[in-house]
Amino acid sequence: MKCIYCNSTDSRVVDSRAADDNTSIRRRRICNTCGKRFTTYERIEEIPVVVIKRDGSRQSFHGEKILAGIKKACEKRPIPIAQQNKLADDIIREILNTVEEQEVPTSVIGEIVMRKLKEIDEVAYVRFACVHRQFKDLNTFMEELRAMIQEDDKK
């Protein structure tokens, strides 16, 4: 690490601790050449993930959008905010762990969200599915409900 005072690359770490946001490490260093102290921050290099939209366009992956969709689906449902946040974190982690080529279609993201929502609340699942699957009419919606009922009957 280069000293900000004398540009020497000879320094040592004297203290390390998690930064305030817990996503980086704060390191206090001392330069072995000039003796001055300085602070550096170390954080994980994030691999940029690109989302492939239905129309073929591409945009950067933003986990906040997943959380927003979950919150909308869970609106007026008895699902605590903490559980919604944890669900979003789990989904984001799963997406980042399964993406091999740094590109993921929205259909894959939607299916993961629906699978996880279905485990928590069926109404929230149906709400999200209505938007994600773009039900064209009542018959398509009813087919989804029938599939859910049949699945419940098998349990």
Image: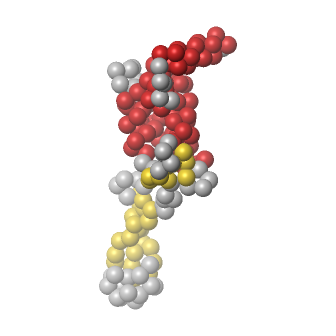
Q: Is residue 61 above or below residue 47?
A: above
Question: What residue lies at 48% left-to-right and 45% top-to-bottom?
Answer: 55
Q: Horizontal and vertical percent for residue 42?
A: 44, 65
Q: Quadrant of the C terminus?
A: top right
Q: Quadrant of the N terminus?
A: bottom left
Q: Horizontal and vertical percent for residue 14?
A: 42, 72
Q: Horizontal and vertical percent for residue 19?
A: 37, 58
- Viewer-proximal residue among 9 and 125: 125
Question: What residue lies at 47% left-to-right and 52% top-to-bottom?
Answer: 58
Residue extending furthest toward the top? 153
**Relative horizontal placement of residue 118, taking residue 75 as reference (left or right):** right
**Relative horizontal placement of residue 6, taking residue 119 as reference (left or right):** left
Q: Is residue 48 above or below residue 149?
A: below
- Viewer-proximal residue among 14 and 10: 10
- Viewer-proximal residue among 20 and 104: 104
Quadrant of res 72: top left
